[in-house]
Image: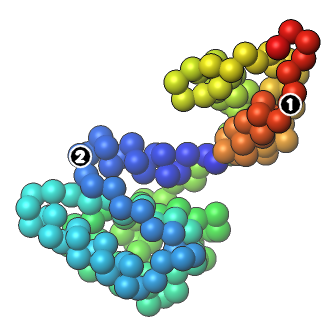
């Protein structure tokens, strides 16, 4: 809910690289090998691949080691995310070839702005619905979301879709 996948997609788009996504909780070595093979083929054609590996802490040492040759050779750019401390859960060989960034939880003000935009955005939000939401409600949702935009937006959507209309519609 802080934008890890979104940031990886932006990097991929801005660098004109193909975006590949794997979740280490569900992907195995075969899935990883398929992505790396596609990345090698694309590189031979002059293209680039960004692999976003979510929950890298779920990969064991063997799975993490399998990434090394393709990362070293530049066959793919690895962007990995973890909610754990990477210095304990990502092997040192990968860490030595990486730049680590910590993404902080969103503030309540950030979340309020996101919720406000979602209410008024007719194309990607709830702006086509005849809604009236008090500012206090948005701040409450921002507070209980605990820094997670996805959680805040889901709560807003559920509230808007399940609250019956008042006398004015």
Classify 92 as above or below 139. Answer: below
Q: Secondary structure at mark 1?
A: loop
Q: Earlier in the sequence, mark 1 or mark 2?
A: 2
**Quarter of the image holding residue 137?**
top right
Quadrant where the C terminus sits is top right
Is 55 situated left or right of 20 in this image? right
Task: Tell me residue 145's x, y (percent).
Answer: 79, 43
Is 9 situated left or right of 128 in this image? left
Q: Nearer the viewer, residue 114 or 84?
A: 114
Res. 86 in view: yes
Distance from the alpha carbon under mark 1 to that under mark 2: 43 Å
Residue drawn at point x = 83 percent, y = 35 percent = 162
Q: How many marks?
A: 2
Question: Where is mark 1, residue-wise?
Answer: 163
Question: Where is mark 2, residue-wise?
Answer: 16
Task: Tell me residue 80's x, y (percent).
Answer: 47, 64
Task: Tell me residue 50's x, y (percent).
Answer: 32, 59
């Amino acid at each position: 809910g802080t934008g890890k996948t979104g940031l990886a997609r932006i990097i991929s788009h801005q660098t004109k690289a193909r975006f590949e996504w794997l979740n280490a909780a569900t992907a195995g070595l075969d899935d990883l090998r398929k992505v790396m093979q596609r990345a090698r083929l694309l590189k031979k054609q002059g293209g680039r691949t960004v692999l976003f590996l979510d929950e890298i802490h779920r990969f064991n040492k063997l799975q993490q080691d399998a990434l090394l040759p393709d990362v070293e050779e530049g066959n793919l750019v690895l962007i990995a995310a973890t909610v754990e401390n990477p210095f304990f859960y990502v092997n040192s060989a990968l860490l030595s070839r990486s730049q680590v960034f910590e993404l902080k939880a969103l503030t309540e003000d950030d979340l309020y702005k996101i919720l406000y935009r979602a209410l008024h955005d007719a194309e990607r939000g709830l702006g086509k619905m005849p809604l009236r939401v008090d500012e206090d409600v948005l701040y409450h949702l921002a507070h209980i979301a605990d820094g997670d935009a996805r959680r805040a937006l889901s709560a807003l959507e559920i509230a808007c879709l399940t609250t019956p209309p008042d006398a004015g519609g």
